[in-house]
Amino acid sequence: MSFLTPLYLFGIIAVGLPILLHLVRHQPKNVFHFSSLRFLEHKPPQTNRKNKIEHWLLLSLRALAVILLVAAFARPFFKNRDLELTTTQPPNQTILLIDTSASMQRQPLWEQALTKANEIARQTTPEEVAIYTFDTRLKAIKPLRQAKGARVSGSLERNQSLLADLSPGWQATDLGAALTELASLLQEQAVSDPTGSLLRNTTIELITDFQAGSRTAALSQFSWPEELRVQLHELKSEQPGNAGLQLLTLDAESQPTVRIVNAADSEQEQFTLAYESLPGQTEESQQVYVPRGQSRVIRLAALDQAAPVPQIVLSGDQQEFDNRLFLQPPTRASLTVVHYGTPADNSIESANYFARRAFPSTRQREIDFQTIGPDSPPLLLSATDIHLMLISRQLAPDETAQVQRYLEQGGVVLFTLHDDTTTESLNQLVTPAENASQRIKTGTPEINGYALLTDINFEHPLFQIFQAPEFSDFTRLKFWNYRSLKLPEQIPHQVLARFDHQSPAILELKRETGTLLVMTFGWTPQESQFALSTKFVPMLNAILALNDRALDAPAQFTIGQKVKLTAAEQTRQIRTPNRSVIQLASGQQEFAETIQPGLYQVQSESKPAPGRQFAVNLDINESQTEPLAQEKLEALGVRFTDASASTTDKTSPADLHRQAQLRELEQKQQLWRWLIIVALALLGLETVLAKWMAGKSSATGKA
Amino acid sequence: MSTNASPRRNQRLISQRIDPACLMRIKSLELRAKTVVEGTWKGLHRSPYHGFSVEFTEYREYTPGDDPRHIDWKLAARSNEHYIKRFEEETNLCCHMLLDLSSSMQFQSLGYSKSDYAKTLVATFAYFLSQQRDASGLIIFDEQVETVIPARFTRGQLRRILVELERPPQGSHTNLVSPLKHAVETIKKRGLVVLISDLLSPIDELSTHLGYLRAQGHEVALFQILDPSEIHLNFHETAIFEDLETGEQIALNPKAAQENYQRQFNEHQAAIESLCRKQGVHYHQLTTDTPLEMGLSEFLTDRAA
C-alpha cells in the first residue's frame, strides 16, 4: 500500500491521546466560589492518576479509530499494473505570438519584433516552436502539433525564413481574441492530458507593442487556464506618442467631420490638418491644438465636388502610419420610376399627378419619373435600370410582357385596380391564359359611405414605418370606392391589409425574385383619401425601397469591415488601392478583403464605366499607442511568467506527471472513504460499549 | 457576648421564629423587615409605638427668638399667654449602619447570600428605628464608601434606605478602614454605630478606628454575618476554590484542608472578639441560618443591659 500524502501519517501520534485521557482522569472540574481563601492553605489535591488500564477494549477501539482516521487523511492506495509511470519528460512548446497590427508599422518596432522572435527561435528546439501572428484575427504561420506523436518537421532555418516572410498589416489589434483563441487551441490539444503538464510546459511568447488601443474584451468572457503562462516581450518605439485621424461623417454637402486623437505619451500637441489632392500639395490647412491624451473634433471645409476627391492629411505627427484619411463622398443615387398611367398634367383627377409628386429628387437621390401613356413610345427595358413600376391603366400585350420580364429580373411593381379593364391586365400578368378557372375575379362592392383599412400587417416592410403608435392610426383614411378581389388559391399571395368588409386591400405576390403589389383601390380623390393623406408618400417610397438596388450603399469603411455588395447578378472585380484586381465570384454578396487603407473600386464586367467606389481607413484604436498596463491583462486572468518563477517551475516535470498519475489512481480507488466509514463505526461501537460499561459499574456500585 | 444568651430564652424564641430561608423568599425588603418587627417579635417586647421620644417635659414662657411653631396655641387661646411646650428631644437615638457589600458577602450555600441576609437585617433595624421615631442612617461600602445616607428621622428616611438596599451589588474587595474613617469624620452627633460585615478581611487597622469612634462617645455594635459553610468548611468534594474578591484559584481537597482552616479561622474570630472587648464594642456573630429577630432582640437586650 502506498500513500498519496504520507506526511499525514505523523498524525498517528494522536493515538497517544486516548491512552493519556484513559490514564489521567478526575482532575477537579467543579469550581466553588468561596468568600475568602485567607484561611486556606494551598494544598494541591491528589489527582487520581491511574497507573493501570481498566478497559482495554475501549482503549483499543479508540486508538484504532484514530489510526484509521489518520490513514484516511494520508490517502492510501494500492499500486497495481494499471499504473505505468512514465519517466519521459512531457514535451515543451513555445508559441511565438507576433503582433502584426497597423501600429507595428512604427519604426523600428517590426525590426525589434523580428530580432526578438529570432532570438527565441534560436534558444528553443526548432520542433517545439509554433508561430502565430495576430491583428484582428489569429493566424497560424506554423501551427501547433495536433497529436502527441505527430511531429511537424522543422528546422531553425525554416523557422527563420517563416519569420522573415512576415510583415505588419493595417488591421486593428484584438489581443484578447488572439489570446483566448490560442488558449482554447492549447486546451483542446491538452484534453487528453490529465496532468495538465502539457499546458504547464507551454509558454506563449507574446511579441507586441502592447498599445492601449488593443481590444481585450474577449478575455473577460474567458476563463484563462491556470497552468498556461504568457511571457510578454514589449516593444518600445524610439519616438513615443502618436496622433491619429478618424472620419466621423461625410455629409451630403461633402463636408467631412474629423476626430483627432492624441496619445497620452505624445510630445506633440500642435498639428496641421489639410486636404491633399496631389502628393505634397496641400490645401485648406488648419491648425489644431490637441492636448496629449485627448481628442478634438474638427469640421473641415466642404469638398469641391467637381475636383477629384482629396485625402485628409495630418502633419506634425512623427508616426506616419495613421496620418492619412481617404474620403469617398456619398454618390447621388439615380433612380428610375416608370408609371404606366394616363399622362394628364396638372389634373388632380389623374393618378399620375400624385405619383409624380411622391418621388421628389433630393441631395441623396435623383428620380427620373417616366409616365408611359397608352400612346407613348414603348419603353426600352434593357437600356434603363428601372427601380419601380407603377401600373394604373390597362396594359398592352407587349407592355404586359415587359412587366413580366421586369418582375423576373427582380423588380418591384405596384398595380392599382380601377376597373374591369385593369383586372384583365392583372390576369394577364399573374395567371396563365389557358386556365379559365384560375382567373382573378373582381367586382364592385356595396359601400355604405366609406370603407376603412383593417388587419394591417405592420411587420411587412411596407408598413414598418407606421409601426409606432403615433403613426399606426389608419382610421382617418377613407375609401369611397374599391374593387373586391378574389384570387384563386393556386396563386401564392399575402394580404397586407384588408377593408373592413374583409375584402383584401393590399396584396403581395412574389414572382420568382420580383415583387408584385396589388392595391384594390385607386388613390385619386374620387376614389379615396389615400393620395391626400400623410401615409401616401412614405408608403410609395417604402415600396421603392423594397427594391434593394434602390438602397444607398455606404462608401466609408474601416479596415477589416465587410462591404456589402448590391446587385449580385453580375460578375465583378474590385480594384484595390495598390492597383491589384480581385475577381469576385458570381454569387458573392460581401467583400471582406479590406486589408489596407485606400480607395477601392467595384468594376462590373458588363459595364466598363467607373463603378462604385468606397474608402477604407484605419481603425482609430490603432492610434492609441501609449503602452497598456500589464495589470489590466492580469486582472482579466492572463498569467504572466516571472523571471524567477520560470526556472523553478520547470525543474521536475517528470515528478509532477508521476504525482498526477498517482493522484488519479488514488481517486479511482478512494480507499479513504472506507477508512472513515470504518472509523465512524468503531466510534459508534465504542460509545455503546462505554455506556453499557458505565451502567454496569454504577449498578454494582449501588449494590 | 450575645452568643452567650440564656439557652432557655433562646429556646422559647426559636419556637416562634421565622425560618430565614422562608423570609428570604419575600422579594420586598420592606415586607421582610415588617414581618420581623411586627410579626413574631411583637408582644415579646414592649410596643414600639410607645417610644421615649414623645415625653413631655415642661412649659416655658415665650421669649422673642423662639420658634413660633412651638407655641401652644390652645393654651394661648384659653389664657392669652404664650407658652412654649417643650418636649424631650424628639429622637433619643441616632443610629448609623455601616453595611459591607463587598464580593465576599455574595457567598451563599443556603440559597441566599450573606449580603441578602445583611440587607434584611439593616432593613429590619431601619424599620424598627422608624417605628420608634429614631434617626437612622446608612453607609454602604466595599473597597470604598459607595452610598451615604445621613441619619434622619424624617418620614421618607426608611424609603430612602430601602431603595439603596435594593440596588444590585457592585462588589469588590472589603476595606473596613475607609467606612470607619468616614464615620469618624462625618458623624458628629453621638449615637449608635452598627457595623455589619463578614469581617473576613484583615483587621489590623480595625482596632484604631473603632477606638476613635468609641472616643467620640459613640456606641458601637459589630454584627459579623457568616455563612455556616464558612465556619466549618463543610465541603466534601475536591474542587477548584475561587476567591470571590481576588479571583485567585486553588485546587483543594477540603477534607485535608479543614483542620488548618478551622484553626486559622478560630484564631481570626478570637482576635475580633478580643478587639471588641478591648474597645467596648458590642459583638454579635450571626450565621445566615439564624432567625433575624434573634439578632435584633439580642441587640436590644444587650443595649438595655
Image (tube, rainbow, N blue to C red):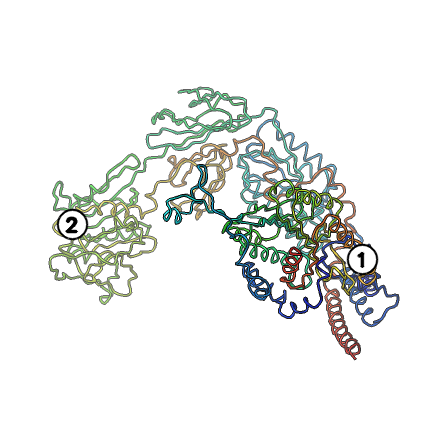
Task: Identify the image quadrant of residue B285.
Answer: bottom right
How far apart are the alpha carbons under marks 2 and 1? 123 Å
The reply to whether callout 2 and callout 1 are in contact (CB within 8 Å) is no
- Helix, strand or loop at label 2? It is loop
Quadrant (top left/top right/bottom left/bottom right) for the N terminus of chain B: bottom right
For disc 2, the chain is A
Q: Which residue matches tag 2?
A: A529
Of residues A245 and B120, the one nearer the viewer is B120
Is residue A1 shown above or below A522?
below
Is residue A56 shown above or below A453?
below
Instruction: Where is residue A52? Give x, y as percent.
Output: 88, 68
Instruction: Where is residue B108? Give x, y as percent.
Output: 68, 60
* Residue occupying image coordinates x 77% and y 74%: A694
Residue type of the residue flagged with mark 2:
Gln
Residue A469 visible within the image:
yes
Mark identifier at residue B270: none
Quadrant (top left/top right/bottom left/bottom right) for the C terminus of chain B: bottom right
